Image (tube, helix red, strand yellow):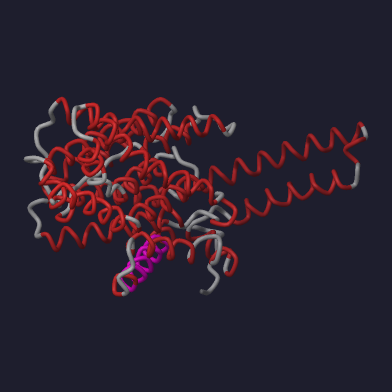
Amino acid sequence: MPELSAAQPSLGAALVGIASVVALAWIFALGLRRLRVPGHPILGGLAAGVLLGPMILGRVAPTTFDTLFGGPRELRVAAETADRAVTALDLAAGAALADGREARATLVTQAEAAWAAFDAATAERRTPLRAALYICAATLLATTASRGARPRRPRGADLLLGVWCTVLPSALLLVTLRLVGEDATSTDALAVAAIMACGAWRVDREERAIARPIGEHADRAILTAGIVATCVACAGLVALAAVRGHDLRGAAVAVGAGVLGAGAVRLLPRRWADAVAFAATTSATALLVVIVEPLAATAILVFLLYFLLAEDGRWLGAWLGRSLSGESASVALRSALVGLNVAPTMLACAAVASGAGLLTPASALACVIAAFCVSFFAPARLRVARRLERPADA
């Protein structure tokens, strides 16, 4: 890709970058769908984000990347030069002298000021990217909720089950972060906890077939509990944005538009709604990943932790909630394995959190990969649920 000048960035350059990564994500996802790869919408977005992100485009054509997605290159060069000056002084052992300590303090102050200016300029440049993330989040919530079974009026049992599905994975995440010495009260940690707490926004045809033998309207009860969990998670993100002084208006508008738009999207033909949901999934994934350096951002253990909490924490919470409500252990386990298709809602919540500035890029990448794992292993989860169904029917 030819180098572009980063001296005078414009809204047009940002829109070109967004359109490029979205179009490439759609192409990759469509190709993977033809190969019948599970989780192809998310995987296509991941591939596009990595290709046009700092890992590849940022190394092959760094000026182009900074123009499309990054901050002003001249400010980055100034900040890196200040860092190198501090390192050179430390290596020369000049900081051990009195004059050297004063010089080092001055250089450190200059480096911090340069990086602060770069971060501020980068945040301003990425305003169109944040707006695109909000649009993807609202579209994902609206189109995903428009498909599958219809929820019923929430009952006490549905609310309690939704709370179980919300509290357990988020609590497990915060406790785990505390045990490994991380700050469980940071904005980033609380945002990830809210994302882990979201529930299924829909129950598809195969899941309904598994749920119906459990009881009358069991699929609608499972869906209602998932919607309760997702609403709690979205409300938590909006409240976190308000308390921590982030973009409250954007987060609230995205969540509200997604929830209120679900009814309007139900008027569309199913094929159209599926196509819009596919496009929103790939787009949100690519936009979340395109500003992250995958090799340096997050350890693989974090991906694994988020996936286990997103999958196991939810079904364990659902199983506990149903067991305590009087269901047998086998029936509770079978119903707990239904309604765990939370990849779209995880991406929607991650897009809201990232757009509002609640998530670091590394945590956003971890949430995306966890969502892909949830989507990739969904067929295996449904096979387990069907096997649990057979002895009861025999």
Q: Position of residue 184 (x, y in %)?
A: 50, 29
Q: Which stretch is magenta?
A: 16-31
Residue nearest the observer in this picture, 14 or 331:
331
Q: Position of residue 23 (x, y in %)?
A: 35, 67
Residue at image position (79%, 48%) is 85
Residue at image position (14%, 63%) is 271
Residue 67, compared with residue 83, is above or below; it is: below
Residue 329, compared with residue 91, is above or below; it is: above
Q: Position of residue 379 (x, y in %)?
A: 28, 58
Which residue is situated farthest in the front direction here?
Answer: 394
Residue nearest the observer in this picture, 80 or 190:
190
Q: Is residue 177 left or right of residue 166?
A: right
Q: How many marks?
A: 0
Which residue is situated farthest in the right direction here?
Answer: 97
Residue 86 visible in the snapshot = yes
Residue nearest the observer in this picture, 322 or 106:
322
Residue at image position (37%, 51%) is 371
Residue at image position (50%, 30%) is 186
Query: Residue 248: which quarter of the image?
Result: top left
Q: Position of residue 37 (x, y in %)?
A: 33, 68
Query: Residue 215: which quarter of the image?
Result: top left
Residue 250 visible in the snapshot = no
